Each structure stands twice: as structure tokens, then as C-alpha cells.
Image: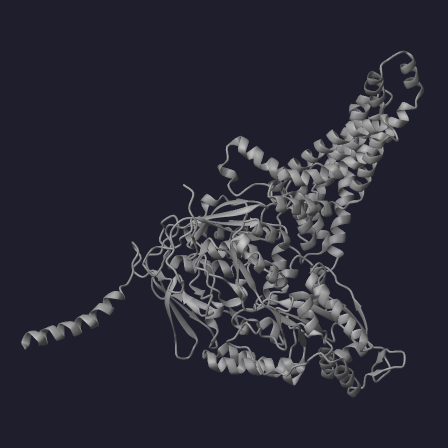
Amino acid sequence: MLQHIARRLIQLIPLLFGVTLVSFVVIQLSPGDFLAEVRLNPVVDSATVEQMRRNFGLDQPMHVQYFKWLWNLLRLDFGYSFAYHVPVMWLIGSRLLNSLILNIAALILAWLVAIPIGIHAATRQYSWSDNSLSMTAYLGISTPTFFSALLLLLLAFKTGALPIGGMTSLDYDFFPWYGKILDIGRHLVIPAAVLGFGAAAGLMRQMRGNLLEVLRQDYVRTARSKGLGERPVIYRHAVRNAINPLITIFGFELGGLLGGAVVIEIVTGWPGVGRLIFDAIVQKDLYVVMGSLVIGSVTLVLGNLVADILLAVADPRIRYD
Amino acid sequence: MRRILIGAVAAILLVAVVPLAAQQKFTLPGIPNPNVATYPPEIGKYGGTYVVSAISDPRTFNAIVSQDTASSAVTDVMFDSLVDQDYITGEITPALAESWTVSPDGRTWVFTLRQGVQWSDKTPLTMADVLFSLKAIFTEGVDNSIRSSLTFDDKPVQYRAIDARRIQFRTEKPIGLFLRFIPFPIMPAHKLSDVLAKGGAEFSKTWGINVNPREMVGSGAFLLAQYVPGQRIVMLRNTNYYAVDKKGQRLPYLTRYIILTVPNVEQARLKFLAKETDAYAARPREFAELRAQQQAGNFTIYDGPEGFGSEFVVFNQNPAGISGPKLAWFQDVRFRRALNYAIDRATVSQQLHAGRSTPAWGPVSVGLKLYYNPNLPQYPYNLDRAQQLLAEAGYRKGADGTLRDAQGNIVEFVLSTNAGNPDREAIGNILRQDWTKLGIRVTFAPESFPSLVGKLTGTYKWDVIIIGLTGGVEPGTGRNVWLTTGDLHMWRPNQTSPATDWEREVDNLFEQIAREPNQEKRKALYFRWQQIIAEQVPFAYFAYPKTQPAVRNTIGNIKLGLAGVTGTLETRYYKGVLRP
């Protein structure tokens, strides 16, 4: 097992190299650069813009820029943001916690809702509750997240019950610790709900499908004929097997925890990493984009690794070497 | 008899002396000549918070490096310059400099620093800070655009300190608009000279958004207290500020100034209506709806004047970018005029601005009353007239409905603008529809902003673009756009010598404008410039929309000024009941 993990970690290196190289080339090849906004300022002349280009190192050939960046990366220096003049790591780090909070809340919400409902739907297949839950799931999957977020924001505005976007209130710093948690919780309701229920819809269908398949297996029939009650049959035997594929999905979602839900963050104004990276891409703030790609790739691979390990732990049939 | 005489003389003296006494000079401890704010209508009371929203996050708190509006919203408040601009009249007013003189030949300017001004850490603000700031602006590696404003005829402005309180600036040729170019933020030498010594790149990184606010000192009305990335900026009152109100009380009145970061204009509006913020710059089409909600929302929305920015469509006349028949069409003024007649400004005004905009015929906004030329040639929407002009210029509409030029080439081009801007996309569709009726094959293809600017200023490979420019009180500062040598002279940038007579005339006009200190004479020059642009149509302008600022009724000293500004930060005050 340990050998397998080590091998997977080593495979991370060529992956990172490939991802960053391709992205770097694509960003540079696309038209325009970071200085687009400055160029359109009627008061700034071209000599100043040229000097800015030199300052940012954008006048050097592409491969020189790439290898300079790679060399710095090996010393864990992710470079500076063109827009903000701060280290890329500080910039991303300032918002990472916010994204983490949102993603974890959405994850918990999604799984807490999806698993029990999925089980409920599978055990009462084709009943009224199963059909209506399926209907809701289809609606949830097909509604675009920005739309549901906007609807909820409007609702919040009309009722005045929830804050309209953002993560903390004006006077957040003056609250006691429990007040702070409550404040973030209130702001978390809309974005986490939208993200969570959107994911829950898909997960629920998965759970239902897997459980239905498992319930058809011979050993379940054997367990029932043994005289076991319905509850232990389902929870002790069936669900444990049905949940295997979902563990893999869980691992993927772990990999995405440090990422940003760009659309939700933009619509609800949640100060996460997604919006930051999106803006950096649009503005072509080179090193922020590259930094976020490195983080994304690493967490993706690690998440996959955790998923595989969890699977090996849960299912004794799976061994890696 | 003598007593009556003495009484009369005493009375006359009293009448003469009492008004003099009323004009007493205010002083602040250590500051013999504070800046007196005479324009605000009311004397305010101290305390309270003023909350506004902003669409983007600041990128830096270093005032010299700051180039975007979100950063300037903080640094302009925290760092004062030698001079400021009156928001009602647009005139240059004293700030850190209490007075200035100009030599008769117009080349030498001397500014006298206000005495006794201190930084927020009680260190005196001296000539050393002014010189340090200028040095930083011109240091290689310091990322700033102020350098451009202080460079005239490719030479940086010469400066030297005459004595501890006076600094002299000298230019090669007289610059009448000098006061418009001179505002630069003054930063503390005692805090930053060490960093500047390490190089320009280091300086650019100092006092960025990762700074500890406690390390910063400022001279402005409010100081940065807290920055929460992506959420809000909290600024607190500078108790050392050098301005007073009409009663001699030290400004500002407010205690806290908070800028909330919101992701888009919709959220800004929602937060304003939910009473989370105190001000909102409404869009023209929201005016009627918001006016109906004034009572319920406890705010007032003002029917503001037009802003100074402009929006227009530009035709590429640059042989370095396009060639062949297309170049010939766009270089043909009759073609441009014909297409100008086919722009349905009434529909643009109605659809985008709900009627709250004025049709635009030239580069100066109708809101800039000082220099707006009301007698420009107009091109009222008339497709027949457009078709007629095209026919006169040799473009014929064939039996199949397509327009062909005199050589038989089908007239077709790509119309572009920046994607994601719904107003410009709407204009693009309106233009495409009308120009198609003329028989032209127009493809409307919005693209990303960096890509668009890359074409405008880099590759020059574009046909027709809808875009806009910001504007100011003095259009002469937009040298990069109107001079033929400018790189923002969009239709044909970076010319070595003027390609047409009218462009040569505009070059001359702008040189004269830059030298002319007399406003009336400048006005005549601006009038002629607008006339030329309206005749030659390198840009075809659409409309100048009105501003409609909305402010909560709990904020006092609201008076509408130029471009929809409702007051200055240091004179606003909170009328409501303060919480203990």
C-alpha cells in the first residue's frame, strides 16, 4: 500500500509539469495581456506601458518566463500578482479559508441530505415519495446554480430574514466568538444551500441506484430468508456495499475542497478563491493563475489518492499490490 | 453737539470694524492656515458611519502605485495631494499646498506648502515628503501611471525645493493646463524612503493589500483601519486632519467610512434597498423605479447631470492593421457620415437609458457645460439620407439588397465590443440591424476585454469597435487619444506625421490648449475641436446618459455637483441618532 501511495505521489510531478506548461502557453498565446486596462487609459502614454511590461517581465520570450517561474516554484516561490503586487500565496491564502468553509458546509449538507433520502427512495421504489423525490432531484440537477442563488437572494431581500450576500456583517469584529460563528452561519445559508442541494440531487440518485442494485443481490435475499429484520438487512449489509462508488465520489469532492465555486461566489458575493482566480484569468494575471493551477492539480491528485485509500479500507476485495 | 459727533463717528467705525471681525481667520493647533470648506450647506455634527459599496477589490494601498478606481477610492481619501478639485465647479483648489504662483511666461510654477500639517503619527509633513514622492514616481521599476502626467514633450517636469515651504516646477514650454496634471499623492518619506532605496520593484510591493494598517500613516481625512479581502474596507477618522468647516471645527465629521465589496451592480442595489449601504449610483433605467421607493427606503434619489465619459463606435483607418477595400471605405469620410446617419440614437436612449440621456454628436459630454459646443452638425436618424449619402459616394445597393462599393466589392465588416457589457452588446445589435438595412453585411462578434484592447493597441487588426473612454473636467488631458502621435488615437495610432489635414489641425489645437491658461480662449479652441470631430466622424458617439445618485436621508450635507457627485467625504455627517 505504501509503495502504491509513493508511486502515486511521484506521478504528481510530470502531471504538474504538463498542466502548467500547457496552461502557460495557452494563456500567453491568447490575445492581449495584463496591461490591457492600462493601455486604454487616455492619460497613460506608451513609454510608461512599455516600462510596466519590462517590470513584469512580460517582454521576455515565453520559454524564459516559464522556466523562471518553474525555477522559483521549486523554491516554493509562487511569484507576485501583477494586479495586486502581493505574493501569489498570500493572495490565494487570504481567501482559501473562506472557500474551505463554504465547500465543507456544502459537502456536509449534500451528504447529510442525499444519503438518507437516497436510501428512503430505494427502499420505497416507485412509491409516491420516491417519485416526488426523484422529481425534486431532476429539478435540482437541471436548475443552474446562479438561478437558484438569485432566487434565494431575492427571497432574502423580500423577507429580510437573511443577509444579502457577503460572508460577515459590518460589525463582525465586535461580536463575541459565538456571535461570529452565528454571523458566518447566517451568511452561509444561501450559498451552502444552493451548492449543497445541487450536489445532493445527483448524489441521491446515485445512492438510490446503487442500493437498488445491491438489494437485488443473492446475499440480501439470503439475509432476509435467514429471518433478519428489514433494518439490519438494509443498513448493516446493503448500504455498506452500495456506498462504495460514493466513496470514490467523496474522495473527488475532497480534492475540490480548496477550489472555488466561481458562479456561487460571484452571485452571492462570497469572498472565496473562485472569484479571485476567475478575475485573474480574465485579466491575465499570469502568476496567480499558475499558482491556482498548481494548487488545484495537487489537491485533485491527493483527493483521488484519499478516495482510493478509503475504498481499499472499506472494501476488502480491493488491494493495490 | 460734540457728543453726537463722537457718537456718529463711533457708529461708523463700528459698522466698518464689525464685518472685519466676522472674517476672523480660523486656526488649528499648530496649523495657522487650515483649509476651510466653505461650500457645504450645513454645519454637521460629529460621529456616525457612512457605508458605500464597490464592485471590485482594491489592488494596493500604495497611493503612487494605485491605478484602478477601487484602490484610488481608498488612497485618494488617505493621501492628499498639493491640490484638489472642487466637485461643484471643477476648479483646482488648495489642499496640502495653500497657494501657488505662475511666472508670466507660464513655464515656472511655485507651490507653497501649508504650514503645520502632520501625518497621522504626528510627524510633520514637510518638503522632504513632497520631494520623496516625486522621486518615487520617476524611479525605474515603480509601477505607476502618474509619470505620464508629469512628462511634457517627452521630458519629465523639472522640480526643486526653493526653501522649506516652497517647491518650484519648470517646463520647457508653457503648459496652461499644468494644474490639471500636477495632482500626485504625497507619501511619507520617514516611512518609505528605506524601501525606495531598495529599488522600484520593492517599492511597488510596499503598502499593498497585505500591509498591516497600523504601519501606515496618511494625511487625508480618513485612515485605513482594516481590510478584509473580498469583503470590506474600514477607514477611521483622521483626528489630525488639516481642514475645518465654516465654524472652525476640525473635519471630518464622520467617525467611520466603510466600503463593502459586492460582486455586481445588482447586489449593490439590493444592499442599498435593504439599508445595508447609504449610497448607490443608480443606472438611468432604474430612476423611475427607485423614485417610487424613496419613502419606504428612507432615501433621496437625485436627477443628476450627465457624466463625463463617452461611448462611441470607431472605424479602423490604420493601413498597418487593415488593407484593401475595407481601408478605403473606413477612410472615406462620406462612408462614415452615412453610417452615422443610420445610428438610431433614440432607440439607444430608450432601450439602454429609459430616455434619460441626450444624443451625442461630439467628444465633449453635455454635462461639461464649461466646454460643450451646442452647435455641432447633427446626424438625426434617417436611413434614406444614409442610403443617399452612400449612393453619392459611389456605394450602390444591388438588386439582391447588398451594398457594393464603386469597384463592386460587397461592403461587409465585423463589429466588435467587449463581451459581458450588456449596454454595449445592446448597442451592437441595434447598429447591426440598422446597418444591415443599408445593405451592409455586418457580423457582430463581442470578445473579451483584454483581447479587444490587444487589437486596439497592439495588432491593429480590427474593423469596427464599440468602446468608451473616461473623461474629466479638462478634455485637454486626454492627449493620448487626440494627438496623432498618441497610442490611443484609436483609428490610426502612433503616426509619425499627421495623415490628414484635419488631424493636423487637431494636433495644433491640442498644443495650443495645453499652453493656454485662459479658460475662455481654451473654450474657443475646444469648440473648434468638437466641430472638426463632428464633421469628420472618426468616432460616432451615441448618447450621454444622466447620473442619478441615491443617498440615504440619514446622511447630511448632500449637494449635487458635477457628474453626479453628491458631496465630499470630509463634510458628510450622520443625521441619525447615534448608538452609544
- The residue sitting at the bottom extreme is B392
In which quadrant of the rendered view does residue A7 lie?
A: top right
Which quadrant is the C terminus of chain B positioned in? top left
Q: Position of residue B125 (x, y in %)?
A: 37, 55
Q: Is residue B368 above or below residue A316?
A: below
Q: Position of residue A274 (x, y in %)?
A: 68, 45
Residue A123 in sight? yes
Which quadrant is the N terminus of chain B positioned in? bottom left
Residue at image location 67% in from the left, 75% down from the top? B539
Q: Is residue A19 above or below residue B413?
A: above
Count of residue discs: 0
Q: Position of residue B322 (x, y in %)?
A: 77, 73
Q: Is residue B261 left or right of residue A192?
A: left
Look at the image and name its color scheme: one colour
Residue at image location 47% in from the left, 59% down from the top? B185
Q: Position of residue B59 (x, y in %)?
A: 57, 52
Residue B55 in sight? no
- The residue sitting at the top extreme is A226
**Foreground residue among B36 and B125:** B36
In which quadrant of the rendered view does residue B324 lie?
A: bottom right
Q: Is residue A305 left or right of residue B374?
A: right
**Foreground residue among B219 and B133:** B219
**Foreground residue among B411 and A38:** B411
Q: Is residue B226 above or below residue B100?
A: above
**Foreground residue among B292 and B256:** B292
Q: Is residue A306 left or right of residue B349?
A: right
